[in-house]
Amino acid sequence: ILFSYCIVSPTENNNKKGKLNMNKKFNAKQLTLLGLMTALLLLMSFTPLGYLNIGPLAITFNVIPVAVSALALGPVGGLIAGSVFGLTSFLQAIGVGGVSMLGSTLFSINPFFSILLCFVPRMLDGFLLGYIFRSAACFVTGFAAAFLNTLFFMSALILLFGQTEYMQGLINGQNILLFVCAFVGVNAVFEMLSSTVITGAVGSVLLKAGFIQTPAKKAD
């Protein structure tokens, strides 16, 4: 994907006279990267590449394209990629391109709340990542991508479905905090680790290639 991105990205003129054109080309490159990340999200969502299903939960790598989009296009890019992530989660909840056990069960309980659960945490995650990168490194942004996705998703899950018979059966009288820790468990840790390493590595390559700006340069 990065190779393809480099091919479609035109060579920029560094002289001052061509500064305006350079900025336009850079915007085109950002949009190209966003398109590639969107395609990657769709590919990962509907193939075994994006999810590792374990019981009712799925370890997802889809937060990584969202994080990379936020690095390249800021809050707007993260929001768009997060929306695509949410769309794929919704489609799986209704059995399109695969089935999420948790998603399909929650959709049968309350379709509207299920839609909110699929979209809002992922969109909010991507949007905030664009701001986080303004004051943090790529690796930190990668960690935040998985951490916030888990935090927002579990918070929305408890808020929207916590009082349902299905969720009460899963909670089984436990303390909410203990339930959340047990529910996500190793999944969340693995997601955070993979997102930190991969997003950090990809972001570092893009930074060195000049495809995205460092937080310091953005501030200037």
Image (cartoon, rainbow, N blue to C red):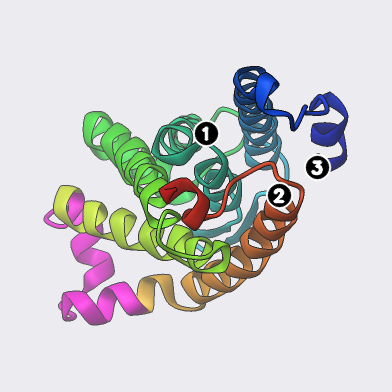
Asked whether 162 falls inside the magenta stretch, the response is yes
The amino acid pointed to by label 1 is: Thr
The residue that label 3 is drawn on is 2
The amino acid pointed to by label 3 is: Leu
The residue that label 1 is drawn on is 88
> N-terminal of the two: label 3 or label 1?
3
Residue span colored magenta: 161-181
Residue 101 % position (x, y): 47, 49
Residue shown at the point (16%, 81%) measured from the top left? 175
Residue 83 shows in the view:
yes
Image quarter of residue 152 = bottom left
Q: Marks 2 and 3: which is nearer the front?
A: 2
Q: Marks 1 and 2: which is nearer the front?
A: 2
The residue that label 2 is drawn on is 206
Residue 56 shows in the view:
no
Residue shown at the point (81%, 24%) measured from the top left? 10
Instruction: Please say if 178 is above or below 107.
Output: below
In three-dimensional space, the C-alpha distance between marks 1 and 2, rounded to whole angstroms, equals: 26 Å
> N-terminal of the two: label 2 or label 3?
3
In three-dimensional space, the C-alpha distance between marks 2 and 3, rounded to whole angstroms, equals: 9 Å
Q: Secondary structure at mark 1?
A: helix
The total number of labels drawn is 3
Residue 205 % position (x, y): 75, 55
Question: In the shown orientation, is residue 40 left or right of residue 133?
Answer: right
Question: In the shown orientation, is residue 138 left or right of residue 37?
Answer: left
Quarter of the figure with the N terminus? top right
Q: Secondary structure at mark 3?
A: helix
Tags 1 and 2 touching, CB below 8 Å: no
Image quarter of residue 18 = top right
